[in-house]
Amino acid sequence: MAKVKGNVTFDEDLCKGCGLCVSVCPVNIISLDTGRINKKGYYPAAIEEMDKCIACSNCATVCPDLVITVERL
């Protein structure tokens, strides 16, 4: 198992499912969770495999609604 480099959290109720974070993730671990709908009526973004996150912060930087927080460990 790889050492976890960061912790990514999403304020899912603010996410509008634009998918920008999905498109900039270099390790392809972010996707829109089509199994759930948030309070705004969108599919929220979610991390599939946190242990593969490299804590690059690309997702947080590109998010227009400041939904994503990245903590480097």
Image: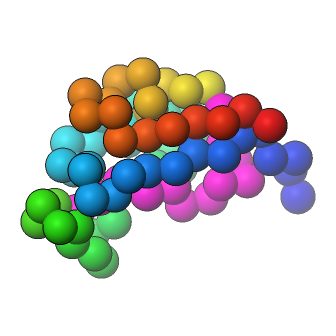
Image position of 4 (left or right of 20): right
Q: Which residue is drawn at 51% across and 44% down?
A: 28
Q: Say which quarter of the image contains residue 35.
A: bottom left
Residue 10 can be seen, yes or no:
yes
Image position of 6 (left or right of 19): right
Image position of 2 (left or right of 72): right
Check the image and tell me how it is coloured: rainbow
Give the farthest residue toward the bottom. Answer: 35
Q: Is residue 29 above or below residue 68?
A: below
Observer-nearest of 73 and 27? 73
Q: Residue at x 44, y 30 (%)?
A: 60
Return the x and y of residue 48 as percentages of the image width and height: 54, 60
The stretch of residues the image draws in magenta is 43-55
Return the x and y of residue 22 as percentages of the image width and height: 37, 41
User: Does 7 appear in magenta?
Assistant: no
Image position of 13 (left or right of 60): left
Q: Is residue 66 above or below residue 8?
A: above
Return the x and y of residue 67 as percentages of the image width and height: 35, 41
Observer-nearest of 45 and 70? 70
Observer-nearest of 17 and 70? 70
Quarter the N terminus occupies: bottom right
Q: Residue at x 20, y 42 (%)?
A: 18
Residue 54 can be seen, yes or no:
no
For the image, the number of numbered tags is 0
Q: Which residue is drawn at 33% across and 66% down?
A: 33
Return the x and y of residue 36 as percentages of the image width and height: 28, 75
Quarter the C terminus occupies: top right
